[in-house]
Image: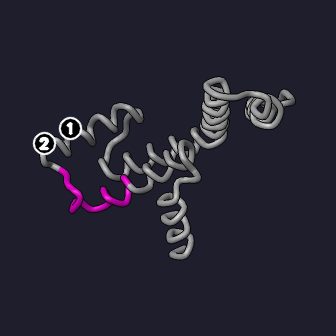
Amino acid sequence: MHEQPSAPELIQAVADFLRDDALPKLDGLTAFHARVAVNVLEIVKRELEMGPRADAAELAGLRALLGRDGSLDALNQDLCARIAANEMSLESPGLLQHLLRVALGKLSVDQPGYSTYQRLVSSQKEKD
């Protein structure tokens, strides 16, 4: 059974209340902390909504890149070890593309308004 409202909807409701109702009545350090709280809530909401898909894409990319199976953490450790040992570099087929996709996935959750992220997403859409 699907519960209503969902966790992302509840988080958005709290963020909206803080931003639209509480924040205008606050000042100074308390207003700053309220803005930080709104940003945190919005990051958590995006993580709930987009995180599983981003993790699955990263895992698939690592499996293809490394040619083996494993957990996301284990494959990331393997990739880091291979880079540290100079077994892989930016010249390694697929590595740069994988790193870019992972970085864009993380930015879509953490900082979707970041101008460089916006520019890269726009250029990716033009290529597709």
Residue in the picture at 75% in, 36% down: 19
Residue placed furthest toward the front: 28
Number of the label disc, if any, that sits on residue 81:
1
User: What residue does disc 2 label?
Assistant: 85
In the rendered view, does 64 fall on the left or right side of 3?
left
Q: Quadrant of the C terminus?
A: bottom right
Is residue 89 located in the magenta-colored stretch of the structure?
yes
Residue placed furthest toward the top: 30
Secondary element type, mark 2 = loop
Query: Which region shows up in magenta?
Result: 88-99
In the rendered view, does 1 fall on the left or right side of 122?
right
- Locate residue 90, reporting x and y percent: 23, 58
In the rendered view, does 115 fall on the left or right side of 12?
left
Query: Does residue 9 appear in this view?
Result: no
- Locate residue 33, reporting x and y percent: 62, 26
- Locate residue 1, reporting x and y percent: 84, 27
Using the image, determine if residue 31 lies above or below residue 100. above
| Residue 51 picture quarter | top right
Q: How crowded is mark 2: few (under 14 residues within 10 Å), some or many (20 or more)?
A: few
- Locate residue 108, reporting x and y percent: 56, 49
